[in-house]
Image (spheres, rainbow, N blue to C red):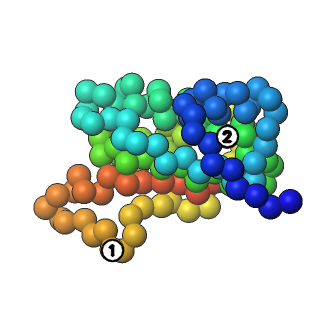
Amino acid sequence: EERVDFIQADVFDFLRDQAENGELYDVVILDPPKFAHNKRQIDAAARGYKDLNMYALRLVRPQGFLLTFSCSGAISPDLFQKIVFGALVDSGRQAQIIRHLGPSPDHPVALTFPEGAYLKGLLLRVF
């Protein structure tokens, strides 16, 4: 049975409820708004990204995929990967990085403005 559901809800509540109900999905995509508008907000943003990814990882069917993104310029790609790793440990799951993701070629980043490289993501295969 193929279908797509569009649901409007608080994502943290929704993911938590779905995990508690034992729901599983082949693919989960996380593309939240910017959690850190500046460097002072990094710790709070990291907690938000970690919780979001932990709940999402619990919802991915074995051999399924998680696509997770951050558009917070204050969160580096390295830090984002570490946050997702922490979520993976807390979720009790295993995963492989299939691909590091970033902006498409029509979104170039000026060498003089590295903050323009704010979009980062990971494609994970979850076990």
The amino acid on which the numbered mark 1 sits, given as a three-letter code, is Asp
21 relative to 85 in the view: left or right: right
Task: State the image coordinates of residue 21 (x, y, percent, origin top left).
Answer: 80, 29
Judge the density around disc 2: few (<14), some (14-19), many (≥20) Cα neighbours within 10 Å.
Answer: many
Judge the density around disc 1: few (<14), some (14-19), many (≥20) Cα neighbours within 10 Å.
Answer: few
Task: State the image coordinates of residue 24 (x, y, percent, origin top left).
Answer: 78, 43
Is residue 23 positioned above or below 114 on the image? Answer: above
Instruction: Tell me the residue at 43%/31% (across/down).
Output: 46
Q: Secondary structure at mark 2?
A: helix
Kindly tell me whether residue 90 is visible in this rendering.
Answer: no
Instruction: Tell me the residue at 17%/58% (across/down).
Output: 113
Instruction: Tell me the residue at 74%/31% (across/down).
Output: 19
Closer to the chain start, of discs 1 and 2, is 2
The amino acid on which the numbered mark 2 sits, given as a three-letter code, is Leu
Task: State the image coordinates of residue 115 (x, y, percent, origin top left).
Answer: 23, 52
Residue placed most toward the observer, 46 or 106 = 106
Q: Please state the total of marks drawn on the protein image.
A: 2
Q: What is the quadrant of residue 65 in the picture?
A: bottom right
Is residue 9 positioned above or below 119 on the image? Answer: above
Placement of the N terminus among the 4 image quadrants: bottom right
Q: CA distance from mark 1 to mark 2?
A: 30 Å
- Hey, which residue is sitting farthest right in the picture? 1
Query: In this rendering, which labeled residue sits more in front, label 1 or label 2?
Result: 1
Q: Secondary structure at mark 1?
A: loop
In the image, which disc is placed on residue 57?
2
Labels 1 & 2 near each other (Cβ < 8 A) = no
In the image, which disc is placed on residue 106?
1
Is residue 117 positioned above or below 109 on the image? Answer: above
Instruction: Tell me the residue at 42%/61% (across/down).
Output: 102
Residue placed most toward the observer, 49 or 18 = 18
